[in-house]
Amino acid sequence: MSRLAKILYSAAVYTFLYLPLAVMAVYSFNASKFSLSWKGFTFEWYGRLWNNVSLMEAAVHSLTVAAVSATLACIIGTLAAFILFQYVFPGRKVIFGTLFVMMMSPDIVIGISLLLLFLAVQFPLGFWTIMMAHVMLSVPFVATTVYSRFKGFEGEVIEAARDLGAGEYQVFRHIVLPLVAPAAIAGWLLSFTLSLDDVMISFFTTGPTYEVLPLRIYSMVRLGIKPDVNALCVVMLAITVTAVLVSRHLLKEKK
């Protein structure tokens, strides 16, 4: 391909991917409330977000669930990656394969299966159920991210520490954690983003008294797309992009 053809092809791909987001961002500043016709530039819809009590409550719920579930998923996923990398035991490959099965499973399947489980054990739907669901969603992503970091350093470092008398806790605390900290933080940010953006699993695992922001947006869109919905989506997009950029920066290998 010629250089011009490559540029045109790249431009077409990026236009296809990001043009809808750009249109949404532009119309979030539209002064018109009930139509797509441009009536002027305004920040009014962003200001109204702060005065919407129910919307802010849903945002706090989403941030709380995302922070708690990301933290738990980061801890569980990091420990799981360390065990899978360091120890050889029966079923190790099966466990590692199930991580990818969970990552590739449709959200609707995970959501329905968790709903059936919670109903079977008569666990009330609410904060704890949606938090556990998001932890289960995020652990495979954290584990695979941290595991890839483990593959990047020599195992002889751990063996040398053990030869010098370090115990399992000391090895993990003083050697493993500093080495995988960037990947663990990136996994936390990725988990936070997955939780904040999830709709399908949240729909099946949350209760009527605990509404999260993605479901709130979904209910608002069913009545028509308005500029305040666009403004809210732009704010969520900004949070997501920031988390992804920080995650990519932490995962980038230093020269």
Image (cartoon, rainbow, N blue to C red):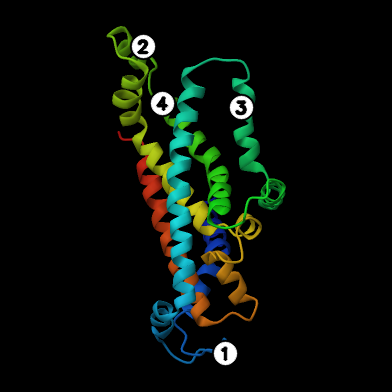
Q: Nearer the viewer, mark 4 or mark 1?
A: 1
Give the percent coordinates (x, y) of residue 67.
42, 52
Mark in front: 2 vs 4: 2
Q: Residues within 10 Å of mark 3 (few under 14, many from 20)?
A: few
Badge 4: how crowded within 10 Å, few (<14), some, or many (20+)?
few
Q: Amino acid at mark 3?
A: Ile
Q: Which residue is mark 3?
A: 95
The alpha-carbon separation of the residues under discs 2 and 4 comes to 16 Å
Local SS, label 1: loop
Tell me which label, 4 or 3, sits earlier in the chain. Answer: 3
Instruction: Please indicate, yes or no, whether residue 139 appears anywhere in the rendered image.
Output: yes
Q: Residue at x 48, y 39 (%)?
A: 142
Q: Quarter of the image holding residue 41?
A: bottom left
What residue would you read off at disc 4? 152
The alpha-carbon separation of the residues under discs 1 and 2 comes to 66 Å
- Against 69, residue 166 (above or below) is above
